Image: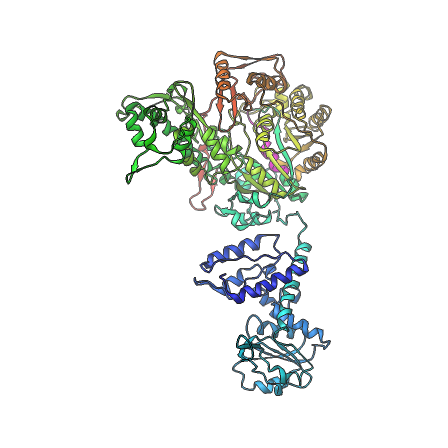
Amino acid sequence: VGNRDDSNLYINMKLKAAAEIGISANHIKLPNTATEADVLKCIASLNADPAVHGFIVQLPLDSNKPINTEKITNAVAPEKDVDGLSSINAGKLSRGDLGDCFIPCTPKGCMELIRQTGVQVAGKRAVVIGRSKIVGAPMHDLLLWNNATVTTCHSKTSTLAEEVGKADILVVAAGRAEMVKGEWIKPGAIVIDCGINHVPDSTKASGKRVVGDVAYNSAKEKASFITPVPGGVGPMTVAMLMQSTVESAQRFLEKFQPGKWTIQYPQLTLQVPVPSDIEISQSCMPKPIEQVAKEVGLFPDEVELYGQTKAKVQLSVLKRLQNQPDGKYVVVTGITPTPLGEGKSTTTVGLVQALGAHLHQNVFACVRQPSQGPTFGIKGGAAGGGYCQVVPMEEFNLHLTGDIHAITAANNLVAAAIDARIFHELTQSDQALYNRLVPSVNGVRKFSDIQIRRLQKLGINKTDPMALTKEEVNAFVRLDIDPGTITWQRVLDTNDRFLRKITIGQSVTEKGFSRTAQFDITVSSEIMAVLALADGLDDMKKRFGRMVVACSKKGQPVTADDLGVTGALAVLMKDAIKPNLMQTLEGTPVFVHAGPFANIAHGNSSVLADKIALKLVGKDGFVVTEAGFGADIGMEKFFNIKCRYSGLRPHVVVLVATIRALKMHGGGPAVTAGVPLPKEYTEENLQLVAKGCSNLNKQIQNARMFGVPVVVAVNAFKTDTKAELALVVQQAKEAGAFDAVECTHWAEGGKGALALARAVQRASQAPSNFRFLYNVEMPVVDKIRLIAQQVYGARDIELLPEAQEKVALYTKQGFGNLPICMAKTHLSLSHDPEQKGAPTGFVLPIRDIRASVGAGFLYPLVGTMSTMPGLPTRPCFYDIDLDPVSGEVNGLF
């Protein structure tokens, strides 16, 4: 801290010594304006960096701000305190734990000099003059624990000469020039002089010379060994600093395997029958989230705590780990599900608990953040279930860190901007609009940056607001939005059927401008899709700017950039872009980030969470992410959209299947949420299972089509029989799965997914020849047809007139080379939710096509897609309550 000449001299000596012996050493300079908090922040970063084996804080601290030196030295992690000045190291030394502490370098150097004489310390009488924390006090302890009889003297010692005369070993660190006289010294004594003092000397150019605390010329006649000043203790101090740093590195390597996390895995206490999800979640004690962050190699300044159990992770970690190889990338998907779901989230969590807590692999789960709409509706939460959950599940399923609220605010800001702009253009002249859009502030008119971009888009290369012609002013101020083309809707993260169609602008203040509009649920917003696909702040901002919200009356796309709202959106989303760190029941780390719809969007968690996780786990670790709905939807979009934009290549597909869903595909009765299962699903029926495996076989083929090995996870329920489970395993292997295993993780936690984890490990070593299904340069219709025929099993597609118009429009507007994101029912491979199994020969109807240009895809609508769910007769909220005494949430599932 600061720029003291003497400190710089000492530091340069240490840097030179380090370079000579091959230690990588750096000098971190803080200005003399640095505060105590600045120094502590720097120390915290060094404490957390596994690449730093030791560091020292050069004293004194040359700052013009008050700094508590004791607080600073004690902030250094004891295991990196190679100067040995922290209270913990001092305490261990005074207690005699010499093998478990760092000894201050000067006393350590003095001790080494004494050893070099060959004189045995044990049994000798030693005198130490000085009691500083840096030299005197630790020197006393060091001699004592080497079995000398030690006396400490100081400035108040009245019989100093007498005490010195008794010493077989004399160490002087008093800071007084030549205070110890030669005649005081016992003949044959060992004298170690730690003092550095300046005394006048007219023969020197500087007018002074350096002397020690001992009168050297007279003392050397009596002592058997004596250190000169300069050139004695000083070089040894630097040498001991180097030695301590090497010792620190050795201890680190003994304790930590390179690339292996040292992580604490809480033990599950399994109960039969399995309690409710919320009971299990609340019965566990999650680790402090800052501990989880430290365990996986995150630095303190890379983590923003949101209470004790959740945190946001800074994107800067990607830059720090840019040279770290990625781990293995695993995607969990499923067969075509029943309305009840088949346990993909539970399997994802069970798999990472097995890989981490049981097989001790570095592993991260990356999952979507759930919408609050289903949480209070009929589906419930999405944290997994049983003994495979992200915890605390109430935090996970409710507000988390506010990302969805940020998306709601950003989305609705765009919606407000659209209607406000239409209103103002309808009620003002060109000049009035221009005067308000580019106001004079203190007599100066200036375009904002986003307005400059609009001018450039219009081909107007001017920056002076006074230089525009009337025609240019007209083009600049008139977006001329056609209300009938507005595709941007307001959003709310609540299931509310009465907002599916509304009329806005009915107040008299809106002067008769009203239109029909609607609310969608927040997770269907394009801003959510952008968040999930962006690879950084800059990319997110550019995607926001490209979002098309409507067309002008001339058919030109109107973007968020045209509205002037892009920068404001980035500000609203600046925290939401950081992944959220949580943990599973068994203490493995989880990123919860983004939750786009799996029908009108791509249904996968964020690219950024996956990228950070892949760096953190290292080349031998695993990142397990989940794709929404069945493999024909979420997995196909994971490959063709998410992997296309991220550049990441998956190693393994885990395909989740259940006996229940296979029986449904085999012709079993309808499965309805909230209604007890018919007996066909609770009794053995091998015929239904065998017939239903047609869907399993098709989804295996779909995964293999992309060149990735498939492991089938048969998620076992208590009503499943051994014969049914064995049949599915056999059918899956015959259909081309790399392996197929029975899983009982819901009831047993990670232990119940061990077979799955081992299968995934083996599959990750198999060749993965990943490839996309289509080239984005293909015509829009051809890309849709390829997905329909290859993935769904359709004979052909049929574009209805509105869809045909959109193909022509988007191709003309330059959006034809975007990937395709099919919006289709998840309850069938076809467009008809009643068609189960693996239907073929059908024609897939494309009702309409819409564009999410910012997110980067076109989404054809196959049938009618509801983007605002409704509440059932008996929503989940009837059972949700808060205990006012304990503060615990009850009733979530």
Rendered residue at 63%/56% (across/down): 24
| Magenta span of residues | 339-351
- Indicate the quadrant where residue 657 lies: top right
Is 15 above or below relative to 382?
Answer: below
Residue 373 in view here: no
- Indicate the quadrant where residue 233 lies: bottom right
Rendered residue at 58%/86% (across/down): 161
Rendered residue at 30%/28% (across/down): 433
Is 716 above or below relative to 392?
Answer: above
In this picture, residue 284 sits left or right of residue 458:
right
Q: How is the image coloured?
A: rainbow
Q: Is residue 534 magenta?
A: no
The one nearer the camera, 686 or 382, is 382
Q: Is residue 345 magenta?
A: yes
Percent x, y for residue 467?
Answer: 34, 30
Percent x, y for residue 579?
Answer: 52, 40
Percent x, y for residue 790?
Answer: 63, 19
Is 818 above or below relative to 202?
Answer: above
Is 320 above or below relative to 168?
Answer: above
- Indicate the quadrant where residue 356 lies: top right
In this picture, residue 877 sits left or right of residue 764:
left
Q: Main secondary structure of the magenta part?
A: helix
Residue 605 in view here: yes
The one nearer the camera, 716 or 364, is 364
How many marks are shown on the rendered structure? 0
